[in-house]
Image (cartoon, rainbow, N blue to C red):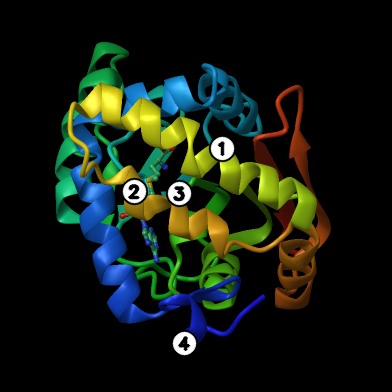
Amino acid sequence: MGSREATGGYDPSGIDLEAWTILEGQLEATIPNYDRVNKLMTFGQDKRWRRNVRNHATPGMKVLEVGCGPGSFAEDLVGLDVTCLDPSPEMLKVAKKRVDASRASRGESPAVYVEAIAESIPLPDDTFDMVFCLFSFRDFQDKRKGLEEIYRVLKPGGRLVICDAGKANWLHGLAGRIWMATAVQLLARIVTKDKDHPWKGLANTYSHYGTNGYYRTMIKEVGYQDVQGRLLWPFAMASRFRGTKPKQ
Ligand SMILES: C[S@@+](CC[C@H](N)C(=O)[O-])C[C@H]1O[C@@H](n2cnc3c(N)ncnc32)[C@H](O)[C@@H]1O
């Protein structure tokens, strides 16, 4: 795996500020077509993955989604006290409208919205029963720092669940890169009707993303217990990581 300088600002441990700022612009540009492209590029599996992650929570829990994007995951968090965090005001604006409308239709109070990065969470220690990261971990500027901050805001005994693009090893990663560079580009072009669509740049985050083993080690080093990280079947396109903050 190359150094950040050699890879335009990316490596498996994080993304330089300059490259991250460009990435954020690309992510915001996906908003109008985000759900449609995701559905097509994952053969509709993204819905199953979100359900799989959501099912880790039990009613009444206080949960945080880090990198909530336009609210595709948070809108279906039912019976929970929800905080949505994202560094993008554009994403938060869309998420708030969407998530609070779903919550209101179920008679639930609005969620809380926090504009921040995972690496610097402006919330107190020991606050959440569960923290979710859906397709945002790949975008963290500093993945270890983000994991440390999430650890800090989790209650003792609280759990982190991450779901992101899968990379079991270099061979699997190569297959993923070919998929991102071909089919995903074509699908995004068809959906957006724009040859300069934002998914062109987004493939970078996958190219320089680490393997499951790399992040399992990092999560353990930060202090989480019972760490697991594996591909989700049948399509093996996503990985799910889990870890628990020790009860002390
Ligand atoms: C691909 S979207 C994921 C949206 C949503 N979680 C979902 O399930 O589809 C990635 C989100 O991560 C956010 N993000 C990027 N860098 C981040 C960071 N350092 N900390 C927290 N969120 C970040 C982006 O602003 C973007 O909204």
Instruction: Tell me the crowding category of disc 3: few under 14, some 14 to 19, or many 20 or more residues within 10 angstroms, Cα based.
Output: many
Dot 3 and dot 2 residues touching (CB under 8 Å): no
Q: Residue furthest top?
A: 105
Q: Based on the displayed image, in which of its 4 quarters is residue 141 positioned?
A: bottom left
Nearer the observer: mark 1 or 3; the answer is: 1
The CA distance from mark 4 to mark 2 is 20 Å
Drawn side of residue 182 relative to residue 89, left or right: right
Numbered tag placed on residue 200 in the rendering: 2
Can you tell which mark lies on residue 5?
Answer: 4
Disc 3, SS: strand
Q: What amino acid is at disc 3?
A: Leu
Instruction: Give the residue type that dot 2 points to.
Output: Lys
Q: Disc 2 on helix, strand or loop?
A: helix
* Cα–Cα span, label 1 and label 4: 25 Å
Residue 182 place in picture, x, y as percent: 48, 37
Q: Is residue 62 visible?
A: no
Residue wearing tag 3: 64
Q: Is mark 3 within 8 Å of ligand 1?
A: no
